[in-house]
Every structure is written in structure tokens, then in C-alpha cells.
Image (cartoon, helix red, strand yellow):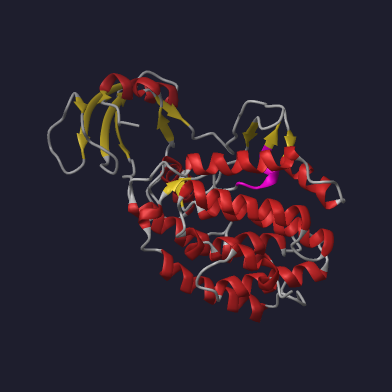
Amino acid sequence: MEMPELTRERLGDYLLHLLGKPVTVTAVIRLGEVSENESVKGYGYGSPIRIDYETNGQCHAVVLHTISPGPFGHEHMADRAQVLLWDYSAFNHLPRHVRTLDVGGFAAAGRMVSLGNVGEFFLLTEYVEGQDYFLDLARLKRGGDLTELDLVRADALCDYLVGIHQTRGLDPGLYIRHIRELVGHGECIMGLIDSYPIDDPLLTPQVLQEIEHLCLEWRWRLKQRSHRLRQIHGDFHPWNILFRSVVDFSLLDRSRGEFGDPANDVASLTLNYVLFSLQRTGRMEGAFATLFQRFWNRYLEKSGDLEMLDVIAPFYVFRALVMANPVWYPTLSKAVRQKLLAFMLAVLETRRFDPSLINEYCGL
């Protein structure tokens, strides 16, 4: 969003709403400057603005702060909002710190909106009909026959990803951030590792430390591949896909930024074919092997992205850490968890992933 012009009228309206009494703005000054302006143009993010005003015959001054978009976790509007919301809460808890009076945002036409009294935020979305894609996989896990509908739905999901992954991202720094967060974010590899019970008999602290070290090596291997930055969903698993008739579907809950590596989406979906097959027969075979290999063949052919085989390992590990985690999958058998662990270690120690070697990766 382009920053609006800060006029005395807009600032006066905002302060009237905030203070509940008439306000006259007497000066708008970019800090570091001397002149008193009628308004401030082109001040951008990150330039504090002093606002002088009068109310009830008393003179007051406040400072308006914004944050510049850029690296270090400030690329997205939500990142910058997070910092300002934290500032509003935390400044006033520290003795001798400058006090915060409000936190707000710029709405349409430059209107300033107060958020200071908000305790939590919410999101409102439309409602769409549909059945979770995982129900199709659950039917196959129970022994159901692989149908033409199963095949065309897998093809539709593949083609959808090929389509959105054609949109390139323009900021190479976002790819570095994406890989850094894959390893270090609280919702990703390190956060998942920290969520395992300390007394887990299978994924012990020593085993998890080994996985973490290997993932750090992969971060350095991948971080310079910013040419791979593409539009992604970010959480493309069967519980976030709603099918209606045949191949008509909608998606839920995209996550982890608009842009990243396409391997994120491919790993998220295809490892579920592996998980359901391991639960069904203890190995990758039958209907799920067909869906898995069909998806990979089609994606590589249509996208031409053979490089994905060189980068997907840590993305698979992220998803496998979710599946093997008793916090998320408390009823998963020890045997399946052992195979997921073998899979993680195998792919991390393999330079180039081979979709045909799933059973070998799982120690079978």
C-alpha cells in the first residue's frame, strides 16, 4: 500500500477519535527537520513524524512511527504489523521507557484507524462447500479400489501446482528467508523438533539433534538458489483441499508467505500418499504408489523443474516431522514412525531425491 499524505485534517480526525475531544493540529514535522508543514508527503515507512496539537487550550506533541519494508523479517505488511503491535504492548511495561498511546493502521483514502483497544485479531472468510481430499485417501487406506476419479483428481492437483509455480517472485531475499524459516521457524523444522516429548523412545534428543544438524547443512546448500522463488500455497496437504464434483476444488489456509520454493507444495501433498500407504500395508505400494509416481512424473514433465529433485529433501523432512510427531499424530504406530524416521535420515543424506526409491528410503 502506498503511504497516504499526512494532512492536518486527517491527523485531527484521528486524534479526535482517539481522545474523544476537539483537537487542532498545529504542526506536522518530520523528525530531524525544523519547518512546520501543513502536511507531509513522501515520508515513507520508517520516518518518525512529530505531530503538535492543541486541545482544551493545552499544547501537546506526539510521534507517529512506521516501519520500512525490507529484510530481517520486515518484507510483508503482517511482519511490520507484528512489530508495531508488540511495541504497543511492551513499551509501557518497562520503567522509564517512552509511553505508547495507540497503535493503528492506514485504511482506504488515507483514513487512520485505531487498533489500540484490540485484544486479539480475527479473520473472516467465505464458506465453501466440499469434502476434504483426505477422505479420498482414507477410502483407499481402508482397501478401496483406485478409481478414475482418484487419478484425475491427482492430475488436477498436480496441474494446479504447475500453474501457480509459474509465477516468479521478484525479491531474492524472500527465498533466503523461506529457506531460513523452513529450518528455524517455530512452525517448521526446529519448532517441530522442540515439540517432541523429551522421553520419546524413537526420536530421541540425540536423533533430533542429528536431523537438525543435517537440515542446517541443507540450508546452506539451498539458500543461494533464489532463482527458484515462485508463488506457492505453503501448506498444500489433503486437509486443506476441498473437492466438489469431479475436479472442482477450493483451497484453505495458505501459509508461510506468498512466495517460496515449489518443493514446499509438492512435498506437502506427495508425502501424504506415502503416509497413507505405510499405514495401509507397511510399505509404498498399490494405489498410493500409483498416485505418488503419477504425480511426480506429471509434475516434472509439465514444469520441467528437474532441479526440484536436488532441493526437496528438507521440505520432506519438515512434513515427516509433523507426521511422526505424537503431538500431531498420537495414534500412529511405532512401525510407521520408524519408517518415517528412516525416510528423514535417508533423504537428508542423499544429494538427489529419487521418487522410485521410497521403500528404500523407508528402510524396506
Is residue 121 something one can see in this rendering? yes
Which residue is rendered at x = 73% and y = 59% of the image? 275
The x and y percentages for residue 263 are 52, 55
Residue 21 lies left or right of residue 266; in this view the side is left
Q: Is residue 107 above or below residue 222?
A: above
Could you say which quadrant of the image residue 276 lies in?
A: bottom right
Res 283 → quadrant: bottom right
- Please identify the quadrant where the N terminus is shown: top left
- Estimate the x, y position of residue 364 in percent, counting from the top left: 74, 74
Query: In front here: 206 or 244?
Result: 244
Residue at 38% across, 25% down = 15
Is residue 187 rendered magenta in the image? no
Give residue 48's position: percent from left, percent from top.
27, 41
Q: Nearer the viewer, residue 316 or 208?
A: 316
Instruction: Give the magenta part as a residue range.
Output: 236-241
Between 176 and 350, the one nearer to me in the picture = 350
Closer to us: 242 or 88: 242
239 is within the stretch colored magenta = yes
Q: Can residue 71 be seen from the camera position used here?
A: no
**Hey, which residue is sitting farthest bottom in the picture?**
206
Q: Residue drawn 61% across and 62% down?
A: 355
Above or below, 255 relative to 228: above
Q: Is residue 133 above or below residue 250?
A: below
